[in-house]
Image (cartoon, rainbow, N blue to C red):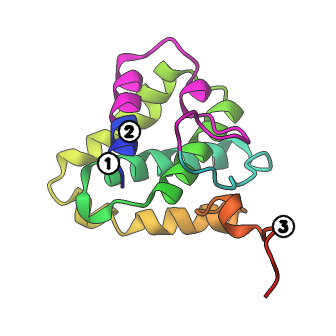
Amino acid sequence: MGNAMRTMRIVMAAMLSAGAAMPLNGALAQGAEGIPGDRLVVPLPDVSGLDDAQARDLAHELARANVITSNCPDHDVGDGAWQLMTGTTDALTEKLKLDPITYDREYFRPAFGLMEDPQACDKLGPGVQDTVDKLIAMGGGTQSAAQTAPQADAPAD
């Protein structure tokens, strides 16, 4: 994973921990044109059909995956999977109407608290790919639409 993505993770974690007053969806939002300076826009799953309990469970799962991938080098994910996870987190925080302080208190801090267990990486790390696979099964993806869409003006062989 590139240094820019790692820096973004650190900045986002610091903003959440500090209870930044900006809306969370502004920090994580991925519109059709992507995040300014970002290299990758991936398809996100539609979370609108989830009830609140399902949305909260998935938000907790994504917070854990975020902490594991940020703190366990053996369980890092590529830029596409990271964008899929953070974009879905954004959609869930919007759906659940979570402000940054609430997200930090109810999701991020408990997930980060798991790192107190010295075996957390080994215990929880393998589940990160399961989370990414779940998001893909829900309609998300880890490759940009530009990479997967056929080129209309590309010459045929």
Is 53 contained in the magenta span?
no
Q: Amino acid at mark 3?
A: Asp
Question: Where 64 sits versus 21, above or below?
Answer: below
137 w.r.t. 50: above or below: below
Q: Is residue 119 above or below residue 39?
A: below
Q: Contact, CB < 8 Å: mark 2 with mark 1?
A: yes
Q: Residues within 10 Å of mark 1 (few under 14, many from 20)?
A: some
The label number, if any, that marks residue 70 in the structure image = 1
Which of the numbered marks, if any, corresponds to residue 9?
A: 2
Q: Nearer the viewer, mark 1 or mark 3?
A: 3
* Dot 2: element: helix
Q: Is 75 left, or right, of 77 in this rendering?
A: left
Image quarter in which the C terminus is found: bottom right
- Which disc, if any, is residue 153? 3
Give above or below for 8 relative to 118.
above
What whole-number distance in Å separates the C-alpha atoms at marks 1 and 3? Answer: 40 Å
How busy is the neighbourhood of tag 3: few (under 14 within 10 Å), some, or many (20 plus)?
Answer: few
Give the secondary structure at mark 3. loop
Residue at the spot 23% in from the left edge and 47% down from the top edge: 115
